Image (cartoon, grey):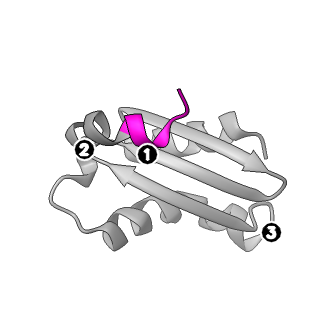
Amino acid sequence: METNQVEALLQKALELDEVKVKSEGSHYEVIAVGSCFEDLRRVKREQMVYAPLMEVIKDGTIHAVSIKAFTPTEWQRERKFILPQ
């Protein structure tokens, strides 16, 4: 599955402000940014991102996924530590 397909799937399901997906084989890294994560703990945020991916996880298209989910305010603060310069 192409990273842009994963991005589109997540964008449609969660209406994110920003989503970045990297892959290495069937292992994916997701950074999701959206107001939908306000007032939610880390585990609940990850569950929200996992939910639209469950079908492709079940069928083996995606073997592993690492998720980092931020509110827009958190992302403004954290992006300098996460994205390569």
The residue that appears at 80% across and 58% down in the rendered structure is: 26
The amino acid pointed to by label 2 is: Glu
Residue highlighted by disc 1: 32
Q: For residue 74, which numbered disc appears in the image?
A: 2
Percent position of residue 28, x then y: 68, 54
The image quadrant of residue 59 is: bottom right
Q: Is disc 2 placed on a helix, strand or loop? A: helix
Pointer 3 or 2: first along the chain: 3
Crowd rating for badge 1 (residues with CA inside 10 Å; few <14, some 14–19, many 20+): many
Q: State the CA–CA distance, disc 1 to disc 2.
A: 11 Å
Pointer 1 or 3: first along the chain: 1
Q: Is disc 3 placed on a helix, strand or loop? A: loop
Residue highlighted by disc 3: 60
The amino acid pointed to by label 3 is: Gly
77 horizontally vs 55: left or right: left
The residue that appears at 79% across and 47% down in the rendered structure is: 1
Q: Vertically, is 85 above or below 57?
A: above
The residue that appears at 61% across and 67% down in the rendered structure is: 54
Pointer 1 or 2: first along the chain: 1
Crowd rating for badge 2 (residues with CA inside 10 Å; few <14, some 14–19, many 20+): few
The amino acid pointed to by label 1 is: Ala
